[in-house]
C-alpha cells in the first residue's frame, strides 16, 4: 500500500527540477543561437525568476527557523 504523497516530488524538489531543466534549456539555446540571442536571454530571465523564487523560499524558511531559536 502506498502512503500519501509517495512517488511525488516535494514542492522544493519540483522547483529544483524546474531550475535544472531551465538551465539545460538555456545552455542548449545558447549553443544553437548564441549567448546574446533573444531566445537565450528570454530563457535566462525565466531561470532568474525560478532562482529568485528558490532564494526567497530559502530566506523565508531561514527567517522562520531563526525566529524560533531566539
Image (cartoon, rainbow, N blue to C red):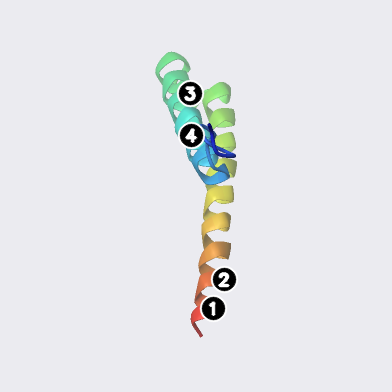
Of the numbered discs in the image, which one, if any, rests on residue 25? 3
Disc 3 versus disc 1: distance between alpha carbons? 39 Å
Above or below, comparing residue 51 to residue 68 in the picture: above
Disc 2 versus disc 3: distance between alpha carbons? 34 Å
| Residue on which the image places disc 4 | 17
Above or below, comparing residue 59 to residue 49 in the picture: below
Q: Give the secondary structure at mark 2.
A: helix
Relative image position of residue 62 (x, y in whole percent):
51, 67
Q: Earlier in the sequence, mark 4 or mark 3?
A: 4
- Marks 2 and 3 in Cβ contact (< 8 Å): no
Residue ID at (57%, 43%): 11
Disc 2 versus disc 1: distance between alpha carbons? 6 Å
User: Within 10 angstroms of label 2, few (less than 14), some, or many (20 or more) residues?
Assistant: few
| Residue on which the image places disc 2 | 64
Residue ID at (48%, 28%): 21
Q: Earlier in the sequence, mark 1 or mark 4?
A: 4
Disc 2 versus disc 4: distance between alpha carbons? 24 Å
Q: In the image as oriented, which residue stretches furthest toward the bottom?
A: 70
Residue 57, located in which quarter of the rendered image? bottom right
Relative image position of residue 58 (x, y in whole percent):
52, 58
Q: Give the secondary structure at mark 1.
A: helix
Query: With 53 as the anchor, is 19 left or right in this view?
Result: left
Of the numbered discs in the image, which one, if any, rests on residue 68? 1
Q: Can residue 48 be seen in this snapshot?
A: no
User: Within 10 angstroms of label 1, few (less than 14), some, or many (20 or more) residues?
Assistant: few
Residue 5, located in which quarter of the rendered image? top right
Nearest-to-viewer mark from 1 and 4: 1
- Marks 2 and 1 in Cβ contact (< 8 Å): yes
Amino acid at each position: 500500500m502506498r502512503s500519501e504523497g509517495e512517488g511525488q516530488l516535494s514542492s522544493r524538489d519540483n522547483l529544483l527540477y524546474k531550475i535544472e531543466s531551465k538551465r539545460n534549456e538555456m545552455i542548449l539555446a545558447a549553443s544553437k543561437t548564441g549567448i546574446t540571442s533573444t531566445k537565450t536571454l528570454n530563457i535566462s530571465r525565466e531561470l532568474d525568476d525560478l532562482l529568485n523564487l528558490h532564494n526567497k523560499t530559502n530566506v523565508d524558511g531561514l527567517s522562520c527557523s531563526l525566529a524560533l531559536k531566539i
